[in-house]
Image (tube, rainbow, N blue to C red):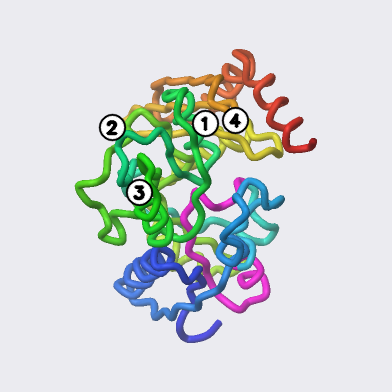
Amino acid sequence: MSTALRIGTRDSALALWQAEKVKRELESRGTSCEIVTIKSEGDLNLTTPIYQMGLTGVFTKTLDAALLSNRIDLAVHSLKDVPTLLAEGLRLAATLKRANPKDVLVKGSDPNSNTIATGSLRRKAQWLHRFTEDQVIGLRGNVQTRLGKVAEQRIKGGIFAAAGLERLGLNTSAVEPLDWMISAPAQGAIAIATREDDEKVNDACTRLNDQNTALAVTLEREFLRKLEGGCSSPIGAYAAIENDTLHFKGGLFSLDGSEAIVVERSFAKAAAIEQIDALVQEVLENGGRAVLKKIRDGQNS
């Protein structure tokens, strides 16, 4: 291992902000670091919708490869971009304290328009479920690029993660919170991936782990993993911890937003992991199996 830990990251402004935060946290604890930027497939292809790219981890695979080939010592990710099943030999060593997990609408130039922009199936499905007469157009690129596209078009607005805007100082009065929208699993959380067998790096990174955030996002990602079944599906999940109680809300939506199966429950934090299976079964038994079959059939046709 080199004297300075090599932190791998994508080269977007938001990814670099996250990597710099991890670097500061590690260096404040006496660990020297340097940042290594790596392009992901999701960064190189800015026209194809993510869900049509035919693979998982479009923003993480190149960093995984760099980790496994020892070109970097750790990788910093937006955890919502990380597949629920990691590449063999890798682990999530730490999840930092979560920022704002919510979605927001960045208002466009035409408040009377019925057009919304987003590249997310989850956001599209939930928007159409609530606003059945609207239409949704695609939106790809880094945060600044997407903001520019929203400003250029005469549309009602575009949907963004609040955490990304806030981290980059881009939160303005033209932002409307979407408190009714169920967030992406692990949205707002920064994760550090490492090699399983690298004890020194794992020891340094584990010190940055926030236990409450780690538990919450583990539940959200498990809900996603158990429901998704190999297809890219509009699934939201959010867990919030209050003292010894955990509040969980999750949902599965049809692609056109016409169907929504939502579960919401509060339970003791100590028993949280065991509750996810029951919530998944509730979704499946209340129409989720049929929704997932339609999504799979559509993707395979």
**Looking at the picture, how far across and down is residue 173, in whole percent?**
20, 47
Q: Earlier in the sequence, mark 3 or mark 1?
A: 3
User: Which residue occupies 68% across, 30% down?
Assistant: 295
Q: Secondary structure at mark 2?
A: loop
Q: Earlier in the sequence, mark 4 or mark 3?
A: 3
The amino acid type found where label 3 is placed reads: Arg
Q: Earlier in the sequence, mark 1 or mark 2?
A: 1
Determine the CA span between mark 1 and mark 2: 33 Å
Q: Is residue 42 magenta?
A: no
Of 37 and 149, which appears nearest the observer? 149
Q: Are marks 4 and 1 in contact (CB under 8 Å)?
A: yes
User: Which residue occupies 49% across, 69% down?
Assistant: 9
Residue with the mark numbered 2: 243
Residue with the mark numbered 1: 125
- Residue depth check, mark 1 versus mark 2: number of the one nearer the observer: 1
- Residue depth check, mark 4 versus mark 3: number of the one nearer the observer: 4
The amino acid type found where label 4 is placed reads: Leu
Q: Secondary structure at mark 3?
A: loop
How dense is the environment of label 2, judged by Cα within 10 Å: few (below 14), some, or many (20 and up)?
few
**Looking at the picture, how far across and down is residue 149, in whole percent?**
42, 55
Residue with the mark numbered 4: 255
Start-end of magenta stretch: 63-84
Residue 191 seen from this side: yes
Q: Is residue 75 above or below residue 6?
A: above
Tally the numbered discs.
4
Q: Are marks 1 and 2 in contact (CB under 8 Å)?
A: no
Q: Is residue 74 magenta?
A: yes
Determine the CA span between mark 3 and mark 1: 25 Å
Determine the CA span between mark 4 and mark 1: 6 Å
Residue with the mark numbered 3: 98
Q: Residue furthest bottom?
A: 3
How dense is the environment of label 1, judged by Cα within 10 Å: few (below 14), some, or many (20 and up)?
many
